[in-house]
Image (cartoon, rainbow, N blue to C red):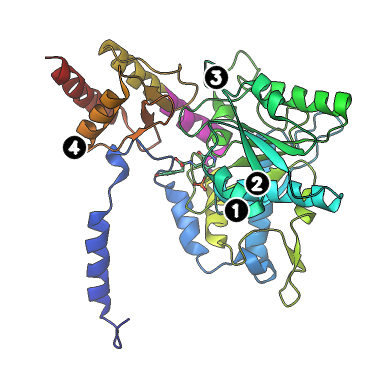
Amino acid sequence: MDERGLSRREVESLLREQKRKDLSYKRVLSSMCTYPHEVAAYAHKMFLESNLGDSGLFPGTKEMEKEVVRMIGSLLGRGQGRGQDSGNAFGYLSTGGTESNIQVIHAVRNRKRREGQRLKGMNIIVPETAHFSFDKIADLLCVEVRKAGLDEELRVAVSSVAELIDDETICVVGIAGTTEFGQVDPIKDLAKLVQEQKQEKGREIFLFVDAAFGGFVLPFLEGEGERRKYEFDFSVEGVGAVSVDPHKMGLSTIPAGCLLFREESYLEELAVPTPYLTTKSQSSLTGTRSGASAAATFAVLKYLGREGLRRVVRECVRLTRLLVRGAAELGVSTVVEPVINVAALRFPTPAEVERVASALVERGWRVSVTRAPKALRLVVMPHVKEETVKEFLEDLEAVVVSSYI
Ligand code: 0PR
């Protein structure tokens, strides 16, 4: 660090220089993030200094966080006044899907340890498609992470989960909107499996749904009549926790994740006393915590409402279909029929996937490649416009056709 600071103009010029090196999202088809909504950016700036880690100083921000938890809980099947068990969900705004996943497993692990289960041997079962944050969990929380196989549609195979369960299994994880293929695991069947394990073997296994990406997409897909197309959240009896990220399809600012438990007592499993702060305890992983992104999430959810989010989702899904149809006309099919705004295009060989991906990168696109099966992964976020899809298809045609001439 230099002894003397620069002038404001010099700093601004340095910032512009760095900004020019960053990509704009325009041709990015590899990211699950996007431009935040304008109203989110406005709120973020207004609450820049707000710290939810010491929320007694920021009661206004704290109220917004509570309201966000309530709103998202109601979107995900809680607090709708249905049946006896219709209270709100309990949770907090995290830094994103990774922290939410860590904290849910952390809470379940702590509960089991408190009940006397030994850490050694403790395991959780996730699908093979689980996000790499679960590998961090194995390392941090010292639980074994077992990976269950998939069915032909790349959803977790419930029979494979069943085979991996033993007396030391503490949690089963299902994914609603997998990172690579956008697939939705059969959450109702997982709930049934967990229920059977309880009845037949007396095993108490927690069921957690990682809906980091799908949580703001699946509620808005067109189902038949009033029926939801996918049941993946608290509306499924037996789901104990759900995670969803406002900084992905919620159009909020980074960092904004949200973890929700059906029962408040799981937050207590995470609580650490904070003697000299304005609040008595903290359940979050981080200490200092962005009030700005909480305000941004509050603002964008209030501004758009379900109607606005539905519009955003439906446009992304429409453009995904357009993209997939266009690819099909070029003889390129998908690995699975896209469920949400994530598509994976299949090519004759893994080498061909790599070749097409690099050729597209050379043409200014950002795309990614899935692991198994290897395919070209495209995420159609709200920054993607119809024009972008058309331009992409033209380049895809050039890249694919050139190789067959
Ligand atoms: N769970 C699921 C299902 C996810 O897809 C992700 C992230 C996480 C958890 C972890 O979320 P955080 O990254 O918020 O901790 N999925 C994206 C991915 O790994 C994250 C991402 C977003 C990566 C934008 C790149 C990017 O440009 O692909």
Picture coordinates of residue 54, whole percent (x, y)? 66, 69
First to last magenta residue range: 303-317
Tell me whether circle 3 and circle 2 mark residues in contact (CB < 8 Å).
no
Q: Look at the numbered discs 2 and 1 and tell me whether their residues touch, using CB distance below 8 Å.
A: yes
| Occupied quadrant, residue 372 | top left
> What residue sits right under mark 4 in the picture?
362
Image coords of residue 224 (percent x, y): 60, 13
- Find out whether residue 80 is within the magenta segment: no
- What is the quadrant of the N terminus in the image? bottom left
- Quadrant (top left/top right/bottom left/bottom right) for the C terminus: top left
Mark 2 or mark 4, earlier in chain: 2
Q: Can residue 265 be seen in this view?
A: no
How many residues crowd around disc 1 within 10 Å: few (fewer than 14), some, or many (20 or more)? many
Q: As shown in the figure, which amino acid type bears the numbered disc 4?
A: Glu
Q: Does the residue labelled 1 lie within 8 Å of ligand 1?
A: no
Q: Mark 1 or mark 3, which is nearer the start of the sequence?
A: 1
Q: Relative to 269, is 96 on the left or the right?
A: left
Give the CA separation, mark 3 to mark 1. 29 Å
Q: Residue 83 sits in which quadrant?
A: top right
- Tag 3 secondary structure: loop
| Residue 222: mark in rendering | 3
Quarter of the view holding residue 291: bottom right
Q: Which amino acid does label 1 sit on?
A: Ser
Q: How far apart are marks 4 and 3 (CA)?
A: 37 Å
Say which mark, if any, is on residue 259: 2
